[in-house]
Amino acid sequence: MKIKDFLKIFGIIAFFTVVSFSGCTDSATPKDPSPVTAIMKKYVSDVVGHFKGRIYSWDVLNEVFPDGGYTSSDWKKEMRKENPWFKAIGSDFVYEGFLAARLADPDAILYYNDYNLDNSSKATMVRNMVKAVNDKYLASNDKPDGEAAGRLLIEGIGMQSHHNTGVSANSIKATLNLFKPLGVKISISELDVLGQSYNDFAKVGQGTNKHGSTTVTAQGLQTQASLYGQYMALFIEYKDIIERVSLWGITDDQSWRSAGLPLLFDPSGKAKAAYYSFTSNTGSGEDIMSLTPMKTQFGANFMMGNIFNPSDVSGSSVTNTRLTRHFNVLTAENNMKPSYISPSQGTYNFTTADNMVNAARASGFQVVGHTLLWHSQNASWMNNL
């Protein structure tokens, strides 16, 4: 069966970033990081192992680098200092975390996921980290039995792509060219585009249902539409390395950045100019359910994805018909994160995530696991190791 003929389920992010463990950076290696390393590996192994065979890909590590202010070119020293695993273990947590995920489910594709990767300095840090981790793995004896020769440990990079009107297609193209020699897959993992600059958006701020307070202008929406079209043209140009394009929501009102009107459809589900530019289709204001499914239109190039939540599921199926019509890959927006999955160390609450994953698979989707290791939305016990 061809990829375009079925839907994939991705597992996003196995790593979060929030632990207060004293004295741990790569310039001040912890006296004995092994106890926390064992805790981290058990957590990753338990979660990935629980979903074994049901998750297409995992975002094992999320947003480990700050946006700038680097004082060296050494990726091992430039990670977010607030990442609890980096604090407690040092940079080795990256390799050990990915390795734990690989051993727990050898069939899952393992991703690193980050935002602002149109920033060349940040993208270079990510490139250097991925190359170093994969080189170490290829030279090691850490592989599961029967693994194909030459398989990488970090097999994909997720470019979140939470953009604004100041992000050019050329800057994204430069990053794709930077990553291409790594031999990894690329996913556009969380795409939305503000209809204004980030500074203008920040005056209203994040949150759903803020579309009524928007300061986006008609010109801003035209610029947004143009950028969506340029981005999709670029994604198709690089279809040999891009395996998935996932939007981060369907209608503007439900976006986490709703004040910036960042998505393809208005609150009533009518197509915006951004949709027509993104898809190169003609029309005006058509209802989302009357349009050609995006998963069909772009299926020869890559999978088309979106986020889903418990409200999109009923019983054993996905009941949000907008999702089932247009997408074939779903990412759990929040319910696979540590704060939901593991409220206390060594205990797990998989009920909601299990229901979502099982319903998505039964409805023909692939699932992305989001997320394992991060600096945010961690369970409280991770901050007190």
Image (cartoon, rainbow, N blue to C red):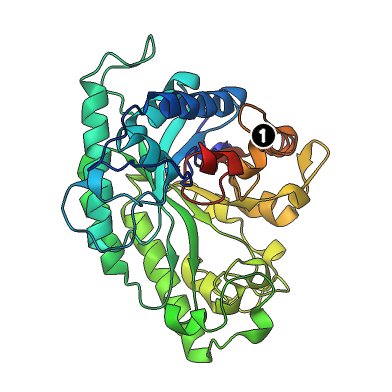
Near-viewer residue (180 or 71): 71
The correct choice, above or below, for 358 with respect to 178 in the image is above
* Residue indicated by mark 1: 361
x, y (%) of residue 239?
35, 49
- With 128 as the anchor, is 192 left or right in this view? right
Provide residue 306's location: percent of width, then percent of height.
58, 53
Q: Residue at x 46, y 49 (%)?
A: 375
Q: Residue furthest left?
A: 73
Indicate the position of residue 146 as horizontal and vertical percent values.
Answer: 37, 10
In the image, residue 85 above or below residue 78: above
Q: Amino acid at mark 1?
A: Arg
Residue 165 visible in the snapshot = yes
Above or below, 140 relative to 51? above
**As displayed, is residue 277 above or below residue 86?**
below
Is residue 101 visible in the rendered image? The answer is no
Q: Which residue is located at x 52 percent, y 74 percent?
A: 274
Q: Position of residue 196 (x, y in %)?
A: 46, 82
Determine which quarter of the picture holds residue 49.
Answer: top right
Q: Which residue does the image show at 21% across and 44% down from the upper left?
A: 128
- Front residue of 191/273: it is 191
Residue at 39% from the left image edge and 65% from the top image edge? 231
Q: Nearer the viewer, residue 285 or 19?
A: 19
Residue 300 horizontal side relative to residue 271, left or right: left
Quarter of the image where one finds residue 174: bottom left
Describe the element under mark 1 as helix, strand or loop. helix
Binning the other alpha carbons within 10 Å of mark 1 as few (below 14), some (14 to 19) or many (20 upward) gives many
